[in-house]
Amino acid sequence: MSHVFKGQLCGLICTDCREALSDVIVRLYRVREGENIAALAVASAKDTAAILSDDDVGGKAGRLIAETKTDADGRFSFELGEREQYAGEAFEVDVYCASVPRMKAGAEETRPLQFTITTLQPQWRRVEGGFLAVWDYCIPFRLWCAIRARFGAWTICGTVRSCETQEPIAGLKVSAFDADWTQPDTLGAATTDGAGKFRIDYSAADFKKTPFSPFINIEWFGGPDLYFRVETGGGQVLLDEPPTRGRASDRENAGPCFCVDLCVDFDEPPPFDQPWFTHVGDFHIYSDISSATGRTLAAVVGHGGPDYGFFGALKLKGFCPKTLPGDPTKPMRYRFLYQLEGEPTPTPIAGALVSDAVIGYRPIYWKLFDDNLVLTTQTVRLQASGATPDPTPAPVSPGPWGPVPAHVIVPDSDGWVTVDQNFSDDGINGVLMRFNTTQVLPVAGAPGSGAGNPVADPKNGRATALIFEAGPVGEPAAYSNTLAKIHVNNWIEVRELNLQQFISGDSGACSGLSADLDVLYSVDHELLASWGVRIESASGDAPGTVVPPLPAGSTARGGSGTLHFDISSWASCSYRVWLDTRRRLTDGENDDDTNSLLLTFCK
């Protein structure tokens, strides 16, 4: 009877930066006679992992059971049986590396090496045709970085965030340098991803070279002294560290794996003077949203993704100056309108359609600490109701007056918002309004047809246009631009789960099952990111329990059906049946969460 051993290997650069061990050879060895197998099998891998010498590798060659190569994601699979003379016992797990992932061409050390990880007793569980065990493991960074160093492969992992908000920033170029004793060495550059993360790979030769190389090729210390420069895609420098930063204790003599957090001041001024609608959340209305479908084209700042729709309250962002461009005597106002596809005229976003949003800050004098007025800041909010006078009145009692209340602006019945003339900036640059789409398009759960049945009346979202208008107070709009199509879907997905054996209710639902289990499920939504059925015992994988592959997917409209199981051989235990769903929806800043249904039964 065969034993299938599957797994996945990775190596830690640091705690939040890892890489798959791709294209390495995994070797399984019999445990040497006389070894305390029980003690080795329970020992932590961090205590047993070690780089092997050539003699060590040669000495265990006769005990080799099998070997295989990992794929690009570090996954491997063994099928062990009579040919390998294997019957389920413990074995040693080694890895043979001819190189390491993302090793830069020209690295000084390319000699292969082998390291041992641990002695493993797989937790076999019976499946059709034999036994299966799964083992995923990440090499601790101390060992993995030592291995990378042996190949002359050095790396920097990092994140770039806004100094003010700590939000990650995508699309920035990060360059790394070594403060060399004679001249700075450029180690490499990378662009931050949607989570603000970047990785720069370089070789030891990059920081050991000097202007006199190869005759003098030394570095006063063991590793590079790192400093960084961060700039926008257009070349605007946001951070430019001096070479002396590399001599600080946290940057000097960096090791082969180095992780760093950088922050930049990213308060970008508007690229224009006239009013303009630019974003829904973090998605640019022209470059990030498909004009054909109204759905997102790709992930932005770590959320959304290809073909995501929108839901909930949407932050509509852009710029509107305090006064008319060219005429500082005329204060400005703006509004948004929506027009559902197929409707003849647009409707102003006003009243209940407006969700609470912070649109800026302004200076104010307030008795914060005692009876003395001090200059501080006041939050300006846009809400559906609760407008406050301008300026915000101060209490007449002696100070302190406590926290500064927000100044609330309410759009008029036609949706117009007058720009606060007390803003410290030249206007509103950012959130202009928050549109509550749930007041326009349905939120209630789509009707199901009972667990196990296809949905008879599937629901879809609708496309709408978003129109921005701005102009002087009391005058017609002088500026406008439009997002022609944004697809909004607030329907709750159909998510129905039941057990045939318990449908009758009464006392039968409290009885244990013995032979038959029938799981009924139905999933439906126009935009599904993922869905799936799963079964687990209360104690994890109960011995003797064999659960076949269960339905799951990411297709639109999901699926439905009845799953029959013969559970007569399952272990006596309590079990949980889950149905998980997640919609492919974003509000521009946050994505839909996974939702689950749970049923239980006993065997």
Image (spheres, helix red, strand yellow):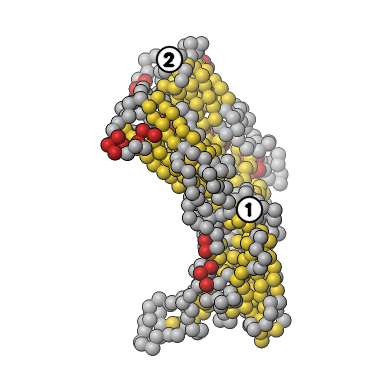
Q: Is residue 539 above or below residue 228?
A: above
Image height of 340 relative to 11, above or below: below
Residue at 52 percent across and 53 percent down: it is 491
Nearest the viewer among 449 and 525 is: 449
Residue beneath disc 1? 295
Residue in the image at 58% along x and 74% along y: 415
Asked whether residue 479 appears in the rendered view, the answer is yes
Residue drawn at (53%, 44%) of the image = 456
Q: Which residue is mark 2?
A: 87
What kind of element bears circle 2?
loop
SS for dot 1: loop
Query: Who's the residue at 70% across and 53% down the image?
Result: 292
Checking the image for residue 38, the label placed there is none
Query: Which amino acid lies under the numbered mark 2 shown in the image of this protein?
Result: Ala
**Residue 574 image point, x, y percent:** 32, 33
Residue 515: x percent and y percent?
A: 35, 25
Displayed quadrant of residue 432: bottom right
Query: What whole-number distance in Å separates the C-alpha atoms at marks 2 and 1?
Result: 54 Å
Vertical relation: 197 (above or below) 531? below
Quadrant that contains the C terminus: top left
Q: How many C-alpha atoms fall within 10 Å of the one at disc 1: few (<14), some, or many (≥20)?
A: many
Q: Quadrant of residue 554?
A: top right
- The amino acid pointed to by label 1 is Arg
Q: How many marks?
A: 2
Along the line of sight, the residue nearer the viewer: 139 or 332? 332
Using the image as rendered, state which of residue 587 and residue 229 is in the foreground. 587
For residue 384, above or below residue 248: below
- Location of the N terminus by quadrant is top left
